[in-house]
Image (tube, rainbow, N blue to C red):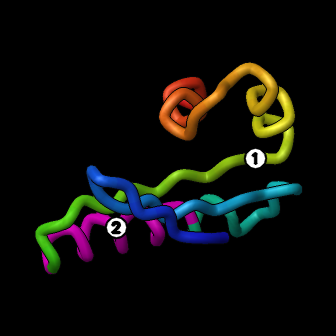
Amino acid sequence: DFILKTKNGYFLIETKGLKGVDVEYKDKRALQWCQDITKLTGQKWQFIRINQDEFYKLSSKTNTFKEFVSALK
């Protein structure tokens, strides 16, 4: 897991190999945290979870992080 700073804000990125039973709750909390920190700082924070299978499928088809994120949506 890591944070990526761009000129338009920040991304909190969660990487997942296997999806366990608590992933849904962690994702909801991460989304809420991003909303909270955006309000507190005035800088945009976004949460993205990247599953391993999606990464392998898309990484060879995209050249930039922006393209990769757009393909995930």
Q: In the rendered structure, does residue 30 fall within the stretch colored magenta?
A: yes
Image check: 13 left or right of 15?
left
Does the magenta stretch mainly form a helix, a strand or a loop?
A: helix
Q: Are marks 1 and 2 in contact (CB under 8 Å)?
A: no
Of the numbered discs 1 and 2, the one sitting upstream in the chain is: 2
Quarter residue 43 falls in? bottom left
- The x and y percentages for residue 44 are 24, 59
Q: Which of 65 and 41 is in front in this view?
A: 65
Which label number is shown at residue 34?
A: 2
Identify the residue shown where x is 27% and y is 50%: 8
Placement of 8 over or under 62, stated as above or below: below
Q: In the rendered structure, does residue 54 fall within the stretch colored magenta?
A: no
Identify the residue shown where x is 34% and y is 67%: 34
Q: What stretch is highlighted in magenta?
A: 27-40
Image check: 39 left or right of 23?
left
Which label number is shown at residue 59?
A: none
Q: Which amino acid does label 1 sit on?
A: Asn
Q: Nearer the viewer, residue 22 or 1?
A: 1
Identify the residue shown where x is 30% and y is 58%: 9
Count all numbered tags in the image, as a single digit. Answer: 2
